[in-house]
Image (tube, rainbow, N blue to C red):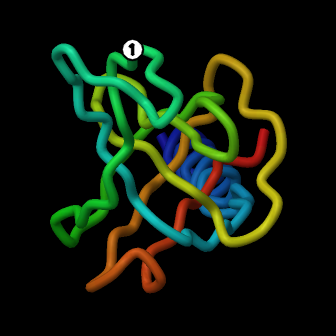
Amino acid sequence: MNKIKLTLILFATCYSSLVFSQQWEEHSIDEFYKKVELDDALDEDGNQIDFVFVKTDLKQGKYEVTITDGPGDLYEVKGTDYYIKFRGYYGYAGYSDEGILEVGSSAWSSTFYKKDE
């Protein structure tokens, strides 16, 4: 019985060490944008446009999110109409980078923590 308890304690210790030692890449946010669909709108050259990106605020909190590459310097928060512009270089997100989006009182006080694989 003591061997089983010792084994369980060792397993729990090793597991918690692995979970808590996970590394996170920290990325500061410049702005949040919301994609707004348009009907019958034209750009400055007279070409029809279907949507625009409008600066927005998000509710403070921590969110588990997945981001993907968006147009230009924007990154899409999958499953939403929200987009992120980072302050520095983020790089290629491809189809998905999972992480935690910590929204502060403004975009500048917000951070995306990417799970390091």
As displayed, is residue 17 above or below residue 98? below
Does 43 sit left or right of 59 as displayed?
right
Indicate the position of residue 30 as horizontal and vertical percent values.
55, 71
Task: Give the quarter of the figure containing the C terminus.
Answer: top right
Q: Nearer the viewer, residue 46 or 8?
A: 46
Q: Nearer the viewer, residue 24 or 53?
A: 53
- Tell me the residue at 44%/44% (across/down): 83
- Tell me the residue at 41%/75% (across/down): 107
Residue at label 1? 48
* Res 98 quadrant in image: top right
Marks counted in the figure total 1
Does 39 sit left or right of 53 as displayed?
left
As displayed, is residue 109 above or below residue 31? below
Specify the amino acid type for callout 1. Gln
Does 95 sit left or right of 43 as displayed?
right
As displayed, is residue 100 above or below residue 95? below
* Res 9 quadrant in image: bottom right
Indicate the position of residue 13 as horizontal and vertical percent values.
61, 58
As displayed, is residue 70 above or below residue 29? above
- Tell me the residue at 53%/28% (across/down): 45
Circle 1 crowding by C-alpha within 10 Å: few under 14, some 14–19, many from 20: few
Q: Nearer the viewer, residue 32 or 14?
A: 32
- Tell me the residue at 47%/17% (across/down): 47
Q: Nearer the viewer, residue 102 or 92?
A: 92
Indicate the position of residue 101 as horizontal and vertical percent values.
43, 57
Element on which disc 1 rests: strand
